[in-house]
């Protein structure tokens, strides 16, 4: 009798578990992603989202939000997102991409399980983004305390130094966040990580093809420097892409879509630099610049005279299955005012895939040297390369009426088997030559890209967390805005135990123990120069 009762209990438990699993499996599809956060440790304030898109304030003004210089109210990009397309052995098409969410979504939060699936419960739980500063990591490594950001860092889906190699993130035993698990010495001044996938729901942003079944682990990072404006004006992005499907793809493409909007959106030109620089490095640079020397269209805050240039440099385009580095495949430029289905934003999976092949959305090949890249007889893959065309063809730049330009840049296709992983890294670089012109700003952008590429080669070791030593050997902290009137904020220090502010005569004028945040009200201070000491960190600012 006892055995029968035990068997009944076991059977009942199994039924309960099965019921729970069936209930959980039925809790689909995933809800739209809602997380957003700012990467803002240096001269850039970039709004990041966890739905495959970034750089716009979707939950607020719905305006552009790649602000540079920070606090200027001027922006250099409206939106950027990742695009993917894949072909299997049966020539079936699979895609995933995102633009403005007006038609729908192709991405959802969270990591895929061993079956390559995710349900709405896990999606909702993963609707987060994780932020940490380099100084917080240093303090944790030195045993100086575990900050809120260190403690909150995600689980094994996010990169971390695993002290006891158990695969479980536990900062109390010495685990801490890293940019790259294979090189934990890389230490940005700020980094933000999140995970998303293309399997959480039906694709509605670009309908007409199957889901790929990919998981994307994204990390955004930035560095600060007292000596390099190039570093202060740049942000870096790393995407680790894993094929969690059972499909073996014969062609798998990764690309970036960017709606640039350089200040005033209606007077832009696009171009690319495919050259190898003096250090034998490929620039892989795709950029926007103003069509004249005065930026502004009356509808947004333009940069005015001598406007900047802005672009993407693919620092690491990824590798093929055999370990060889992939090349860039194509760059297509089109305009907001283009003809739908011909040369404007892609509307479905087929048009997205065509752009990622270096074709127009109607399937026509791009042609070299024509004003719009259409109607010629010389096929090409890269629009407006100037004098850097890979085949040595004549200079080709934009000369038509400028406008609201968008672009899609794609990496060379590779095979992608189940379980395979690839990593790409890219940087957004910004340069302004004052008092110069829009064209000298573009020339400066190329040189700035070279500087950033060299910094990348050395893992930004010259900049570490962006904190350098002052004359009294105290680490410096970035304070903004500077000059300031009402508040100052300190980047890179996390929460501090003690804050002191001294005037120019060395007199302490403010003392706060255990401040609740790194934003400080300075309204009570008189005009003048001040020194801030936040624990072991030193900074300076001017009160207006």
Image: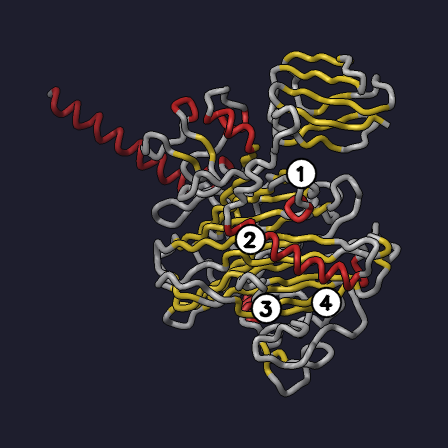
Q: In front of the other: label 2 or label 3?
A: 2
* In the image, residue 467 above or below residue 531: below
Q: Position of residue 79 (x, y in %)?
A: 67, 53
For numbered disc 3, what is the local secondary structure? Answer: loop
Between residues 29 and 171, which one lies in front from this camera angle?
A: 171
Distance of label 1 from label 4 (alpha carbons): 38 Å
* Residue 202 visible: yes
Residue at screen point 59% across, 68% down: 275
Residue at screen point 81% across, 28% down: 542
Label located before the other in sequence (3 or 4): 3
Label located before the other in sequence (1 or 3): 1
Check disc 4 and report the residue beneath it. 335
* In the image, residue 506 above or below residue 295: above
Distance of label 2 from label 3 (alpha carbons): 15 Å
Label located before the other in sequence (1 or 4): 1
Label located before the other in sequence (2 or 1): 1
Q: Position of residue 188 (x, y in %)?
A: 55, 39
Distance of label 2 from label 1 (alpha carbons): 17 Å
Disc assigned to residue 226: 1
Between residues 476 and 274, which one lies in front from this camera angle?
A: 476
Label located before the other in sequence (2 or 3): 3
* Residue 204 visible: no
Q: Position of residue 319 (x, y in %)?
A: 42, 60
Check disc 2 and report the residue beneath it. 454
Check disc 3 and report the residue beneath it. 275
Distance of label 3 from label 4 (alpha carbons): 25 Å
For numbered disc 1, what is the local secondary structure? Answer: loop
Residue neighbourhood size for the residue with mark 2, other residues' Cα within 10 Å, grouped as few (<14), some (14–19), many (≥20): some
Distance of label 1 from label 3 (alpha carbons): 30 Å
């Amino acid at each position: 009798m006892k055995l029968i009762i035990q068997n009944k209990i076991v059977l009942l438990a199994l039924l309960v578990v099965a019921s729970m699993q069936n209930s959980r499996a039925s809790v689909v599809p995933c809800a739209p992603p809602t997380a957003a956060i700012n990467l803002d440790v240096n001269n850039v304030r970039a709004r990041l989202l966890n739905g495959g898109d970034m750089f716009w304030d979707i939950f607020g003004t719905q305006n552009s939000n790649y602000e540079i210089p920070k606090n200027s109210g001027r922006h250099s990009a409206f939106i950027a997102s990742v695009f993917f397309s894949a072909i299997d052995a049966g020539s079936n098409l699979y895609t995933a991409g995102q633009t403005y969410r007006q038609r729908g979504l192709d991405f959802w939060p969270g990591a895929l399980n061993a079956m390559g699936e995710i349900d709405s419960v896990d999606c909702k739980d993963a609707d987060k983004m994780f932020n940490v500063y380099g100084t917080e990591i240093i303090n944790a490594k030195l045993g100086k305390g575990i900050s809120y950001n260190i403690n909150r860092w995600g689980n094994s889906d996010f990169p971390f130094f695993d002290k006891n190699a158990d695969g479980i993130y536990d900062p109390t035993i010495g685990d801490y966040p890293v940019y790259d698990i294979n090189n934990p010495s890389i230490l940005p001044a700020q980094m933000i990580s999140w995970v998303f996938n293309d399997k959480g729901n039906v694709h509605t942003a670009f309908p007409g093809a199957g889901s790929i079944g990919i998981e994307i682990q994204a990390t955004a990072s930035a560095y600060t420097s007292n000596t390099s404006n190039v570093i202060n004006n740049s942000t870096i992005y790393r995407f680790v892409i894993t094929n969690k499907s059972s499909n073996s793809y014969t062609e798998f493409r990764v690309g970036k879509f960017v709606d640039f909007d350089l200040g005033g959106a209606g007077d832009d030109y696009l171009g690319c630099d495919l050259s190898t620089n003096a250090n034998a490095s490929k620039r892989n640079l795709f950029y926007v610049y103003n069509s004249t020397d005065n930026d502004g269209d009356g509808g947004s805050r333009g940069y005015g005279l001598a406007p900047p240039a802005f672009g993407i440099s693919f620092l690491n385009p990824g590798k093929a299955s055999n370990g060889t580095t992939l090349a860039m495949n194509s760059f297509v430029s089109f305009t907001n005012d283009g003809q739908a289905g011909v040369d404007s934003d892609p509307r479905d999976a087929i048009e997205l895939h065509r752009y990622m092949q270096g074709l127009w959305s109607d399937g026509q090949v791009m042609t070299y040297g024509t004003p719009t890249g259409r109607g010629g007889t010389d096929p090409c893959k890269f629009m407006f390369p100037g004098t850097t065309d890979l085949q040595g063809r004549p200079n080709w730049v934009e000369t038509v009426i400028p406008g609201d330009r968008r672009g899609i840049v794609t990496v060379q296709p590779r095979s992608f088997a189940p379980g395979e992983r690839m990593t790409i890294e890219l940087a957004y670089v910004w340069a302004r030559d004052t008092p110069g012109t829009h064209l000298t700003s573009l020339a400066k952008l190329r040189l700035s890209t070279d500087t950033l590429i060299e910094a990348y080669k050395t893992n930004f070791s010259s900049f570490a967390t962006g904190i350098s030593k002052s004359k009294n050997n105290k680490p410096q902290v970035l304070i903004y805005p500077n000059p300031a009137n009402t508040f100052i904020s300190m980047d890179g220090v996390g929460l501090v135990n003690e804050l002191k502010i001294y005037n120019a005569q060395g007199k302490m004028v403010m003392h706060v123990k255990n401040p609740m945040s790194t934003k400080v009200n300075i309204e009570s201070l008189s005009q003048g120069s001040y020194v801030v000491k936040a624990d072991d960190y030193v900074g300076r600012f001017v009160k207006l």
